[in-house]
Every structure is written in structure tokens, then in C-alpha cells.
Amino acid sequence: MPSVIKSLFIGVIDANFDAEYIVNAFYCLDIATISRVTLIPFYRKKEKFQRAYIDVLEWHPTESAYNFIARLKDTGREARIVHNQDDWWVVEVNKNLMITSNKRTAKFTTINYLAIEDTKEFVVLPWILSSVYAQ
């Protein structure tokens, strides 16, 4: 599904959600495959939260993905990911595109190596992904 939106931003996420949960939420809702998530912690009234910067590897060719992209592009409407019954996040287009690849935020960034096909960093378990055992 062609789209110019390659990065998303979620302004407030509870601290108990991790990058893997976010990646799985987008994937299981059949919206997108996520390649990278940067979770920057912050405090509001002594309570810990996170800001999420999310890189999209590919949008899924589904109606739910199409509708989600349409909401992201329409500034008059709110785009939400309902990740657990009554729990949802407001999602926006990320305007700070370099944050997920910035060296200063690297310790807050999780890379989804299972989604990246051509990586030099992930060579340990390629046989798991392809069902061909290493010799």
C-alpha cells in the first residue's frame, strides 16, 4: 500500500507498555509492520509515562490500514489504535523523523529485527525465519 507516512508518534503511553507490545499491536490489528520503536520516558505529576516514535516498515494492504492512514492524513480527525478493549492511543504523523536513528536516543530504541530483511546486525538466527537450518 503506497503511502508517504513512514513514522508515527504517540504522545502518551503508560510506562508498563514496551516496544514489543507496540509492534505486536500494529501487526495484530493488521495495520502495519513496525521496524523501530523509540520510547522516551517522561514524568507527569510524579507518574511515569512514555512518548513513542515508531518507524513503519510497511503498511498492510487492508481496509483497517487504509482507514487508519486516511485518519492520519486528515488533520481534523483523531487517529487511534485500540490495542486492548477499552485502551487506546492517539497516533499522529511523526514530524521528528530522525529520533529513532539518533545516537542520543539509541538506548531508548528497539529494533524489530524480525521485520528487517536486509540487516548485517542480525545473522545469528536466519534459519528460524526461513525454516532452513544452518549447516
Image (cartoon, rainbow, N blue to C red):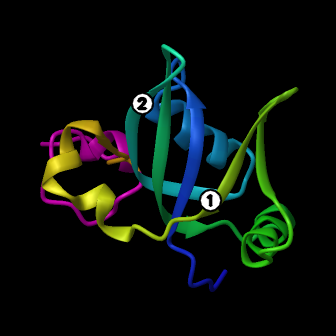
Identify the element where label 1 is drawn.
Answer: strand
The numbered dot on residue 32 is 1
> Which residues, given as a range, are shown in magenta?
115-135
**Other-residue count near label 1 (Cα within 10 Å), few / some / many at <14 / 14–19 / ≥20:** many
Residue at image location 13% in from the left, 53% down from the top: 103
Q: Residue at x 30, y 67 (%)?
A: 98
- Chief secondary structure of the magenta span? loop
Most extreme residue toward the front is 45
**Dividing the image into 4 quarters, which one contains the C terminus?**
top left
In this picture, residue 31 sits left or right of residue 19: right
On screen, residue 33 versus residue 126, left or right, reads right
Q: In this view, does 53 lie above or below 13?
A: below
Residue 114: % across, % down: 38, 47
Which residue is nearer to you in this view: 25 or 45?
A: 45
Is 36 above or below relative to 127?
Answer: below
Please state the horizontal and vertical placement of residue 125, each as a whole percent of the image: 23, 39
Residue at horizontal 85 percent and vertical 69 percent from the top:
67
- Look at 51% across and 65% down and name the residue there: 94
Measuring from the top left, give residue 16's x and y in whole percent.
53, 17
The image quadrant where one finds the N terminus is bottom right
Observer able to see residue 122: no
Disc 2 target residue: 42
Viewer-side residue, 30 vs 87:
87
